[in-house]
Structures are given as C-alpha cells and as structure tokens.
Amino acid sequence: MASSTLVFSKKLKEGIYRGALLINPDVGLEIPFNFEVIYQNRKPKIIIRNADERIVVDEIQLKGDSLFFKMPVFDTEFKCKIMGDSIEGQWINHYRTTKNFISFNAQYNDNRRFLFVPGKTNPMFEGKWEVTFSPGLKDSSKAIGIFKHLEQTDYVTGTFLTETGDYRYLEGMRSGNKLFLSCFDGSHAYLFEAELINDMLEGTFYSGAHYSEKWKGIRNDEYKLRDAEEITYLKNNDEPIDFTFPDLNNKMVSLSDAAFKGKPVIIQLMGTWCPNCLDESRYFSELFSHYHKDGLEIIALAFEKTEDAEKARKQVLRLKERLTIDYTLLVTSRTGKDKAAAIFPFINEVSAFPTAFFLNKQHQVVKIHTGFSGPATGQEYVKYKERTENLINVLIRD
C-alpha cells in the first residue's frame, strides 16, 4: 500500500513497543523484538530494532482499528488490530507454504525484550565460542558464537558466524546462568536459548514456528571455520563463462555483451529472500559506486523462491529501489542451489546464498567467496572488506 495516502492516527500511538511472535503459545514460547512508532509529516513509520540494526517500515495502512504493514524488501507482512495499548494479529511469511502464519502481539510503552529482571553485573558470556548445531547428528554443523555484554551489564548482543553466512544482529540478555537472544528482520525470526553448565553452553535454537535444533558451545578463542574462499572451487578453469538472463526491463543480458568486455566483474548469486544477500547487496552497492568509474562491473543473478518470472521481477525491482542498486540485476526464474550451480558446471557446488565470483578482465575466475560475514560480525566484516577491496584494486590495475 502506498504510504503517501496515510494520515496521523491516534489509535496507533507514537512510542516504544515490545513485540512478540508466539511460536508455541501453549508453553509461552515467543520470539520477542522491539520497535518504535514515529510520525513524520503525519505519516507513521515503524522502526524495528535488533542490536545496532534499525529497520524502517513505511508500507503501512490504517483502517479504523486495523493495522497492516509490509516488511521492506522481504515478502512478509503483518495483519493486526489495535486494541488500546496493545496490537494483536499475525505475521505472514509468503515464502513458506506451511506454518507461514505466526500469531503476533505488541504492548505499548514496554522497552523490554525478554521479561527478566537484570541481575548483578556478570559478563559471563562475553567472548568467542566454538558452537555445534545439532550435535551428534548427521547434519551437525559448526559455527562461531561472538557475544558482548553491553557496558558490563546483563544485556547481550552478538551473532553466529557459519560457513554459509552469519545470523546477523542478535539481541537479548543473561538471566542467572542462562542466555537468551532473538532477532526479527522480516525474514529471520530467531530465538536462541542456552544454559551454562560446567563451562558449556547447551540450548535450543528456534527458527520461526517451523524449525528447532539443539546447540552447544565452549569457549575457544582459537577456533576457525573453513576458509570461505575454499568451499566452492574450480574443477576446470579452462571452460568459458557465459550466461543470458533478462534484466528488470526484460532485456536479455549476457556476460559476453560488449558492456562487460575487458572489465573485471563480480557475479553475485543472491535472492531477495536472503538477509545475508541483503547485507552483501548493500556492500556491493558501495563498491560499485566507488569503483565503477575504474571499470568494475557487478552482475547479480537472482534466484527467487518462485518460478513465476513476473513475481520474481517485482521482488528484485523492490530490492533495487529500496537499496538504490545501480549495478546489473538479472532474474534467473530458477530456485535453489542446484539450479545455481548448473550455470557454472566447472565448479564443485554452490553451498550458500550469497556466493560471489570475482572475475578478471579476461573473465577468468580468480576467487569464489561463499556466504557473507556482514556488519553484525564486527572485525570479520572489516577484514572481508579489506581483502575484497585489495583484490578489486588488483583486478582493475592488471
């Protein structure tokens, strides 16, 4: 809905709210998050907070006591009723075909995230943890947990780094020897619970109402994941690279087009449903703005969660407009990592979205980077940017 048609509503109060997605109401299990309602030029905006992240929601419709708002970029929305100081309704995730509705409520003038009383200062979770998800199972996976207590308090922020990307901005708190973290960004709806037992964290991770798994962690400042530049690799560097897909104007575009000839190119495998891809797209937009004048080109290949070409085009167009992306965006009308790998038969696999191919001026692959360590990862993000920009300077010069 166009936000330009909206006017000030006394029913949607300005101020802070505590929101919660009720993933198992029978046992009181919820994914909490905080947001603020503000009015600018008599039009409402909802600002969702996850640690340092601020998500501005402006596609809002008010009809009487009904409130509808759509998340920016991601194909999810809320349908609610305003009931005095409370908001009640549902979060609808259009990417899913089952368990895609989660009950939602929010309480006005409540800035708590988790409903615990802060205790004495004891930053017991500060630091780096070697984490195992689904320990002991065949689909077990490794991660690095990075947690920080805010100004030596019980309030905690952090994230998990994995070989396919990070869990972005998590926020929560310590209660006794227990850790609680959550995130809601319109695509991710995450809850992490854990208890510290004999120097080991043991707990459960919930993704929306449809998935949960056990996890454990031990302190380990030296633990490292596999190198993100070695997970996807070339089987045959002699095979020429080319592809043809429509852009957002339905014009067919190929890597072999004259516009890209003799120029270094980054090929980005992404999807608008993917929060790590969103972070990478923001960064690539910065790169393009800085280096395009020196010849750098970036081509994004979008793999949407639909084979409807027009729906996929609209989703990618929405991302372009939200992020003001100026590099080339192509719509593949394909879904999944296997379909992405089929475009590049000379590699071993595509194991994650995003994956980025860095090509020299002859369009030979010089690096493949799996996943993306975004700004929530702190120094990992800084190191990634330094390596990437050093490589781009080499590709432009050579």
Image (tube, rainbow, N blue to C red):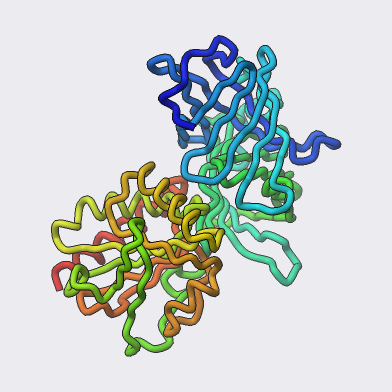
Q: Residue furthest right?
A: 26
For the image, the number of numbered tags is 0
Residue under the image location 64 percent in, 17 percent down: 65
Judge whether 212 appears above or below 73 on screen: below
Query: Does 238 sit left or right of 46 as displayed?
Result: left
Judge whether 72 appears above or below 215 on screen: above
Residue 389 at what x, y percent from top left?
Answer: 26, 59
Q: Quadrant of residue 363?
A: bottom left
Q: Quadrant of residue 398?
A: bottom left
Query: Does 120 sit left or right of 313 as displayed?
Result: right
Residue under the image location 63 percent in, 43 percent down: 189
- Closer to the camera, 321 or 19? 321
Residue 255 at what x, y percent from top left?
Answer: 29, 73
Judge whether 364 appears above or below 273 on screen: below
- The answer to whether any part of residue 289 appears in the image is yes
Judge whether 26 appears above or below 375 on screen: above
Residue under the image location 45 percent in, 30 percent down: 2
Residue 38 at what x, y percent from top left?
Answer: 47, 19
Query: Does 73 sit left or right of 99 as displayed?
Result: left
Residue under the image location 65 percent in, 55 percent down: 218
Q: Residue furthest top?
A: 10
Q: Quadrant of residue 321?
A: top left
- The answer to whether any part of residue 222 appears in the image is no
- Closer to the camera, 139 or 380? 139
Query: Does 3 sit left or right of 132 as displayed?
Result: left
Residue 213 at what x, y percent from top left?
Answer: 73, 55
